[in-house]
Image: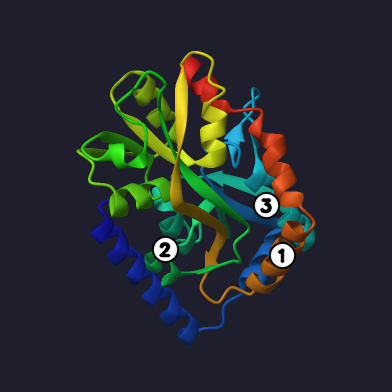
Amino acid sequence: MPLWKKTIFLLTMFVVLIGSVGCSKTQSDMEQILDRGTLRVLMNPEFPPYEYKDSQGNIIGVDVEIAKRIAEMLGVELEIIPCDYADFEEALLKGEGDLIISAFTATQNNKEMIDISQIYLSNAQYIVAMADNDLIVTEDDLEGKILGVQQYAQGDIYVTDMVSAKNIERYAWLSEAAQVLMEGKLDAIVVDKVTADALMQTEDAELKKIYIGGSAGDYCIGMKKGSDLKKQIDALLVTMRETGEIEQNVLQNKIYSSLSEKTEE
């Protein structure tokens, strides 16, 4: 969906939601979740180590552990709903999920439509290119190149705003971008540090990563405007950061990567 159409849709949904609140009393987010007995989390399971599939097809990762902790706090079951990154806000406003937990980055645009939690992780961006590509050594070398990104992720924001690329190819699934890179159809892709580290483990391709200074992405949780979940979620995230629980989950999930399995198919 083009960005301008997406913006119009989100604005329309936002107005409809506000209008419906004024017309009748509706259940709060918390009440709906407790009545249902399930916390529904929108997630793109193609972004290791945050959310990805293990060899049995189970969705695991850093964000899954955070989602489990929130469900545990609320005393309900967790249901993960796979969703393209570009469709998160639309799905949330349609009521298809209760939260967005998927290495989600706040932007000025989506902050006007939904509420955003405290930042739970900051992560620098990296260029990933083939190891024998001598034309890309620093971020300045991205100018005039064909670049791949996951649509609406932090890498997309950086490349769109900061790089004069020849072309930007946007993918719903990061594994597809990695595959196209290895096929030689992209000069480089831009991802966050831990994803770059996971890609370095790909056995069937020699890759290199290059740090992009001053490009840290701040990951947070998205929820509906005025959600009564925000206060409790913010408090939980502060605790998880202070105890080092989130960083430990990152380290534990860095080893296994579904991207390597995808590229072998």
Q: Is residue 140 above or below residue 39?
A: above
Instruction: Give the mark nearest the N terminus, 3 or 2.
Output: 3
Which amino acid, by three-letter code, is at mark 3?
Ala
Q: Nearer the viewer, mark 1 or mark 3?
A: 1
Q: CA distance from mark 1 to mark 3?
A: 14 Å
Q: Residues within 10 Å of mark 2 (few under 14, many from 20)?
A: few
Q: CA distance from mark 1 to mark 2?
A: 21 Å
Q: Position of residue 16 (x, y in %)?
A: 39, 75
Where residue 67 is drawn, which disc sits there?
Answer: 3
Q: Is residue 75 visible?
A: no
Residue in the picture at 68% in, 66% down: 233
Q: Is residue 2 visible?
A: yes
Of residues 16 and 2, the one nearer the viewer is 2
Q: Position of residue 87 (x, y in %)?
A: 41, 51
Determine the secondary structure under disc 3: helix
Instruction: Give the mark nearest the N terminus, 1 or 3.
Output: 3
Q: Is residue 202 above or below residue 10?
A: above
Q: Quadrant of residue 254?
A: top right
Residue in the picture at 72% in, 58% down: 241
Q: Nearer the viewer, mark 3 or mark 2?
A: 2
Q: Taking 51 as reference, is 18 left or right?
A: left
State the residue lying farthest toward the bottom: 22
Q: Which residue is mark 1?
A: 238
Of residues 214 and 37, the one nearer the viewer is 214
Q: Which residue is mark 2?
A: 107
Which amino acid, by three-letter code, is at mark 2?
Thr
Determine the secondary structure under disc 2: loop
Of residues 130 and 178, the one nearer the viewer is 130
Q: Taking 264 as reference, is 120 left or right?
A: right
Q: Quadrant of residue 53?
A: top right
Q: Is residue 207 above or below residue 47?
A: above
